[in-house]
């Protein structure tokens, strides 16, 4: 048996039977010999003759027979072709398990799901190196301890090149399916063989590292979400795999919190190193924070720092990690290639280029989704689309796919309604490494500059072949000869409030193929760099947030310019006549919150925009009735107006909207405005299809300080409205004011507020009703009501208890206690979400 365990083999059934028969025969022979000895002892006194000759003869005959049997059995033993076979797979094999710091609560949560009979499959997703496999190993070993009534637990490492046959082969070995039912059989026959074994067992199948949806039924795994007692748990880097594989529960494995991350880091650095000098614990925290909670990075860098016992060595390593992370031990060979598998699996080169582009933004930077997509379009990554609207939708799809691949994180800033994406610090370093590695040629490099030290002439000369550069802060050596950037396509500039960014004279002189120039929020830029007027290849120019006062006539030289963004430029004067009309390739124009430039009569500017053949998207704020009327009368603007802000119009009492592609509207400080309407002609009033077209893309509405506004009933024609913010509208009594006869049609056909996620009603003294009938609000996340003393009823349907999105209803506690409810179950369902406060979004906007 010891040899069998050592060789991991066991005797075949035939050999086992032969040995058992030999052992039985040996017993019979021993018994026979014992009888023979008895007969010998019974010989006649003084002679050799037995007393009982008949008995002796019988024994002799039996001995000869046994000798023949032994000879035959010996011959049988010499004819075995196979004497041993592999030992049967045990029902569960313990897997090597690394330290699992910070995974306890998540492990408990997964185990709780597996104990639920209604949960047959669990998908664990998250970015590479976050600890998914470690968690699955721990789940496997937990079954080894508890057994919990399962017949078998099967582990399959699926990996990137997964296919049904490969998974079936693993199951064949684990389930000990006879070879005659396997060898030479088709995929369907193998499926049946696996299915017929598993359907009789209560089993757990653990599938690690799935990269694309795997058809479990095609493998032969019986369905587990229909009351089956068996379970399937799998890991993947893509949240879409969880969806496509029908996981009953999808659970994200996230990076570690700061305290847990440092604990894991210390484990791998070792107590001896941590305690070797009083300064090292603080330095170790700095290094751990560079890993941004990613367990694999903490482990690799922790191992690399083990044995580093002087503060001077730690200082050097910290600088290397911050400035040249790819050169840090273990990063280029172990960490980055592991993370890069997610990049390699992206669907096409355009998506890969869009992802790498995100590495040009600073660490922990919140990237506005709209701006990011516009940059991608300006770079030409989305040129396969025929127009800016389709390209924008394509860019949104890429953001979603990068989010599903756990390469980008999406958040929403409630105060600004901006959708933001962020790249994990280590993922960003991996992207910069890829951007430089993808072409070892100089012209393929990315350069990111964020330093307080002086940038020397030599450094600038080294950037000569660079394709893309981004600056956060820099001070350049003076004097410096004008640099040459023959391959530069992109220059991004980011504000750093601690130290303004400035450039030496002539810096923009030689950029013959530059495409993108982004100065957004560079408040210290007060004067227009005159060389920019010579950058005739420029396609994207963003001057938002700068202190520039004048736009020179030289701007009209940029005949290839497709994007011009002039938001939030408080010092900007009126744009000179004929500048915009000279930009013949312009597709997108934005000028929001640049009040001096759009104050008064802007009809000339609007006419220039209207005359541009390529124009596809306009965002503008106006304060003059004549300008607003020009906008409303234009068929061109009806197609391309995306964001309209009407502010400080003292003589406008009625605002007509007829912009089917309008996405965002802000109306602010319009004291005489009484109504916002849609021009409905009689012939289309009864056509639901046509009514849907009026505000079909409107998602954000903000109305502030319009004291005479009576209602916003036009919003019934905005089926995709997500964000509604109304504040200081003293005359508003009802948000939606519709006769009872129209209620059913609005509810069923127009989906009133069906996509509304955020509703803010603040300081509306006369407000009595949002609307007079109950709504489901299936998408509502946050409602905030402040300073609305006469609002006594909320239009919630009793089915609000089924909402999966609702997080908070905020307001004064006194107001909440005075609310009236048509159904007490509604109060019961909503009470857990109520949070008393006086918080106002306007105070943070």
Image (cartoon, rainbow, N blue to C red):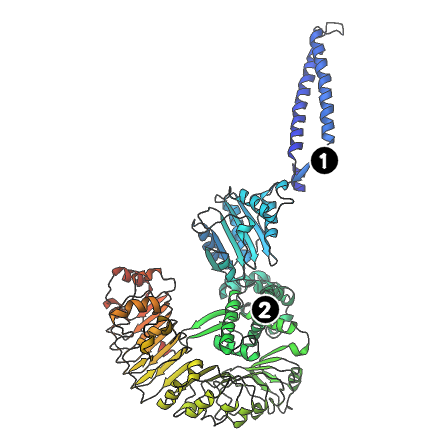
Q: Position of residue 98 (x, y in %)?
A: 57, 56
Residue 444 against residue 300 in the figure, above or below: below
Q: In the image shown, does 410 or 302 lie closer to the viewer?
A: 410
The reply to whether residue 137 is in sight is: no
In this rendering, the label closer to the viewer, 2 or 1: 2
Q: Position of residue 240 (x, y in %)?
A: 51, 62
Q: Please state, as top left, top right, bottom left or bottom right, where the C terminus lies in the image.
A: bottom left
Label 2 and label 1: CA atoms lie apart by 55 Å
Q: Residues within 10 Å of mark 1 (few under 14, many from 20)?
A: few
Identify residue for label 1.
81
Q: Position of residue 381 (x, y in %)?
A: 57, 75
Q: Residue at x 32, y 87 (%)?
A: 652
Q: Quadrant of residue 625?
A: bottom left
Label 1 sits on a secondary structure element that is: loop
Q: In the image shown, does 634 or 252 lie closer to the viewer?
A: 634
Q: Residues within 10 Å of mark 2 (few under 14, many from 20)?
A: few
Residue 553 relative to residue 330: left or right = left
Q: Position of residue 291 (x, y in %)?
A: 55, 68
Q: Please state, as top left, top right, bottom left or bottom right, where the N terminus lies in the image.
A: top right
Q: In the image shown, does 264 or 150 lie closer to the viewer?
A: 150
Residue 85 relative to residue 121: left or right = right
Label 2 sits on a secondary structure element that is: loop
Residue 460 against residue 2 in the figure, above or below: below
Q: In the image shown, does 277 or 819 lie closer to the viewer?
A: 819
Residue 179 against residue 444 in the figure, above or below: above
Q: Which mark is residue 72?
A: none
Identify residue for label 2.
348
Residue 424 against residue 149 in the figure, above or below: below
The reply to whether residue 842 is in sight is: yes
Q: Quadrant of residue 280?
A: bottom right
Residue 72 relative to residue 627: left or right = right
């Amino acid at each position: 048996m010891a040899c069998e365990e050592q060789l991991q083999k066991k005797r075949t059934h035939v050999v086992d039977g032969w040995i058992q028969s030999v052992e039985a025969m040996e017993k019979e022979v021993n018994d026979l010999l014992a009888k023979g000895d008895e007969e010998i002892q019974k010989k006649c006194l003084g002679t050799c003759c037995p007393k009982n000759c008949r008995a002796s003869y019988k024994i002799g005959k039996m001995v000869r027979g046994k000798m023949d049997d032994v000879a035959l059995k010996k011959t049988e033993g010499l004819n075995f072709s196979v004497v041993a076979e592999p030992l049967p797979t045990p029902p569960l094999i313990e897997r090597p398990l690394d330290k699992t710091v910070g995974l306890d609560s998540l492990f408990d949560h997964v185990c709780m799901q597996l104990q639920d009979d209604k949960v047959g499959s669990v998908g664990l997703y998250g970015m590479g190196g976050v600890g998914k496999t470690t968690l699955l190993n721990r789940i496997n070993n937990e079954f080894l301890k508890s057994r919990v009534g399962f017949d078998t637990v099967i582990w399959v490492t699926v990996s990137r090149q997964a296919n049904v046959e490969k998974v079936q082969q693993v199951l064949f070995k684990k389930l000990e399916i006879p070879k005659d039912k396997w060898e030479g059989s088709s995929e369907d026959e193998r499926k049946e063989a696996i299915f017929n074994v598993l359907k009789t067992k209560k089993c757990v199948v653990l599938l690690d590292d799935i990269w694309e949806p795997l058809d479990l039924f095609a493998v032969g795994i019986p369905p587990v979400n229909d009351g089956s007692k068996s379970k399937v748990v799998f890991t993947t880097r893509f949240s879409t795999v969880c969806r496509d594989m029908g996981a009953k529960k999808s659970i994200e494995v996230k990076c570690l919190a700061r305290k847990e991350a440092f604990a894991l880091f210390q484990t791998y650095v070792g107590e001896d190193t941590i305690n070797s000098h009083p300064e090292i614990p603080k330095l170790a925290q700095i290094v751990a924070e560079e890993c941004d909670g990613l367990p694999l990075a903490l482990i690799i860098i922790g191992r690399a720092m083990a044995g580093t016992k002087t503060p001077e060595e730690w200082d050097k390593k910290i600088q290397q990690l911050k400035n040249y992370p790819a050169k840090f031990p273990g990063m280029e060979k172990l960490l980055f290639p592991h993370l890069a598998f997610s990049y390699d699996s992206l669907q096409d080169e355009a998506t890969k280029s869009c992802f790498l582009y995100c590495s040009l933004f600073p660490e922990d930077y919140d990237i506005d989704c709209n701006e990011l997509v516009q940059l991608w379009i300006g770079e030409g990554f989305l040129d396969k689309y025929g127009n800016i609207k389709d390209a924008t939708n394509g860019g949104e799809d890429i953001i979603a796919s990068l989010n599903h691949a756990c390469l980008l994180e999406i958040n929403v800033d409630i105060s600004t309604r901006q959708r933001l994406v962020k790249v994990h610090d280590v993922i960003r370093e991996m992207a910069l490494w890829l951007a430089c590695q993808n072409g070892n040629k100089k012209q393929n490099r990315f350069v990111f500059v964020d330093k307080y030290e002086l940038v020397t002439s030599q450094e600038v000369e080294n950037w000569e072949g660079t394709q893309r550069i981004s600056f956060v802060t820099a001070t350049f050596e003076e004097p410096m000869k004008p640099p040459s950037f023959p391959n530069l396509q992109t220059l991004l500039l980011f504000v750093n409030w601690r130290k303004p960014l400035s450039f030496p004279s002539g810096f923009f002189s030689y950029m013959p193929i530059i495409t993108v120039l982004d100065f957004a929020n560079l408040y210290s830029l007060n004067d227009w760099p005159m060389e920019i007027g010579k950058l005739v290849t420029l396609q994207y120019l963003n001057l938002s947030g700068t202190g520039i006062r004048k736009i020179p006539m030289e701007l009209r030289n940029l005949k290839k310019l497709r994007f011009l963004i002039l938001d939030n430029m408080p010092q900007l004067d009126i744009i000179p006549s004929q500048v915009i009309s000279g930009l013949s390739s312009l597709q997108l124009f934005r000028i929001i919150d640049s009040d001096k430039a759009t104050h008064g009569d802007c009809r000339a500017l609007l006419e220039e925009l209207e005359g541009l053949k390529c124009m596809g998207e306009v965002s503008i704020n106006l304060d003059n009735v004549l300008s607003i009327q020009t906008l409303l009368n234009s068929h061109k603007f009806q197609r391309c107006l995306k964001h309209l802000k009407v502010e400080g119009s003292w003589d406008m009492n009625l605002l007509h909207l007829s912009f089917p592609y309008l996405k965002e509207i802000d109306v602010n400080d319009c004291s005489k405005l009484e109504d916002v309407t849609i021009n409905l002609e009689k012939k289309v009033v009864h056509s639901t299809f046509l009514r849907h077209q009026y505000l079909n893309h409107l998602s954000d509405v903000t109305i502030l300080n319009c004291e005479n506004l009576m209602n916003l009933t036009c919003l019934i024609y905005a089926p995709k409205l997500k964000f509604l913010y109304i504040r200081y509208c003293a005359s508003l009594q009802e948000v939606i004011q519709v006769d009872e006869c129209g209620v059913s049609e609005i509810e069923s056909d127009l989906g009133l507020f069906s996509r509304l996620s955020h509703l803010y009603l603040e300081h509306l003294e006369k407000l009595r009703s949002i609307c007079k009938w109950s709504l489901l609000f299936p998408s509502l996340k946050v409602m905030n009501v402040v300073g609305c003393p006469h609002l006594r009823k909320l239009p919630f349907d009793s089915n609000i208890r089924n909402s999966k999105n609702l997080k908070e209803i905020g307001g004064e506690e006194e107001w909440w206690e005075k609310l009236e409810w048509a159904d007490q179950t509604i109060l019961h369902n909503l009470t857990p979400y109520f949070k008393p406060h006086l918080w106002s979004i306007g105070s943070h906007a």
